[in-house]
Amino acid sequence: MRLTTCAFLLAGVIGIQFSDFASGQATSSCLDGRSCTVLEDFERFEVGGLPTGWYTYQDRKDIRPVNGSLQTDEERFTVMQEGGNKFIRATVRDNAHRIILRSGEGMDWDVAERPLLSWRWRAHELPVGAREDRSKLNDTGAAVYVLFDQDWLGRPRGIKYSYSSTLPVGFTDSYGALKLIVVSSWGEDGLGHWIQHQRNIRDDFERLFGRPPPDRPTAIFLWSDSDSVNSTAIVDFDDLQVGR
């Protein structure tokens, strides 16, 4: 997806409060063994169904709860099950799609108190030839966005954690107020297996922006796109948790 288009779409969800998300109660373990609060593990949804309670959109004026009207064979998120565990699978073919968890009664996440965000993902296919550092090739098969506020131009300020087709782990880039960190890479991590991540959002934000973040993020995105390189991405996401 082109960088300018991405920025305008992301800006459409900043600063709007939502209340129909009933997660965040269960506890589990972070990577280092400390207690974490589950934001979403997809266990409450029907297999083959949709993650109702999340949001999605086609453009900044068309933001709605996830439903079948924006799910097609070319772009969809579907609840799957494997070995008794449920997760969400994103499939995009020459397209871009995302599901959104936004601040409100459902996501009461104070980064100052719980700066750790953990999740796991698994890539089955990534867009061939995609690179997040080139506008005409800027696709990401799997990404987790943490968005906070807007800059003076109205652009979303936050961090994009990427499973890159091409770029190495540790690569960073800047799209104005949005910063990129590659945390998984096809060349280094391969495909077909679960990879778990834990990031200190407060530390990452301060390193990239030179100041502490606002206490409460406005949204988390689970994202997949393959339209810039006319390719396909099939990726799984699971177990979003926050902790101290």
Image (cartoon, grey):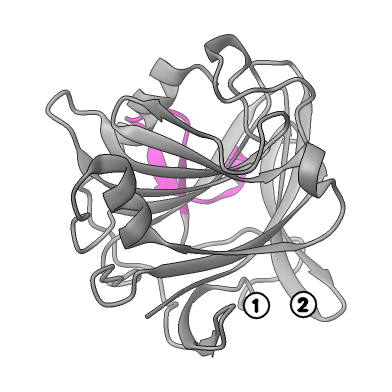
Where residue 163 appears, as percent x and y from the top left, is: 65, 43
**Given contact means CB atoms under 8 Å apart, are the residues at marks 1 and 2 in contact?**
yes
Work out whether 242 lies above or below 25. above
Res. 43 mark: 1
| Front residue (pair 105, 109) | 109
Residue 121 in the image: state x and y as whole percent.
69, 58
Label 2 neighbourhood size at 10 Å, few (<14), some (14-19), many (20+)?
few
- Number of callouts in the render? 2
The residue positioned 76% from the left and 36% from the top of the image is: 233
Front residue (pair 158, 88): 158
> Mark 1 is on which residue type?
Glu
Magenta stretch encompasses residue 64: yes
**Image position of 147 with respect to 27: above or below:** above
Q: Of the residues shown, which amino acid type is indicated by label 2?
A: Asn
Q: Is residue 109 left or right of residue 199?
A: left
- Can you give x and y, in whole percent of width and height, for residue 31 in the image? 59, 78
Check the picture and name the quadrant holding the C terminus: bottom left
Question: What is the quadrant of the N terminus in the image?
Answer: top right
Which of the 4 image quarters holds residue 242? bottom left
Left or right: residue 87 compared with residue 64: right
Q: Residue at x 34, y 30 (%)?
A: 60
Label 1 to label 2: alpha-carbon separation: 7 Å
Magenta stretch? 55-71
Dot placed on the residue nearer the N-terminal end, 1 or 2: 1
The residue pinned by badge 2 equals: 85
**Residue 11 or residue 3, whichever sits in front:** 3
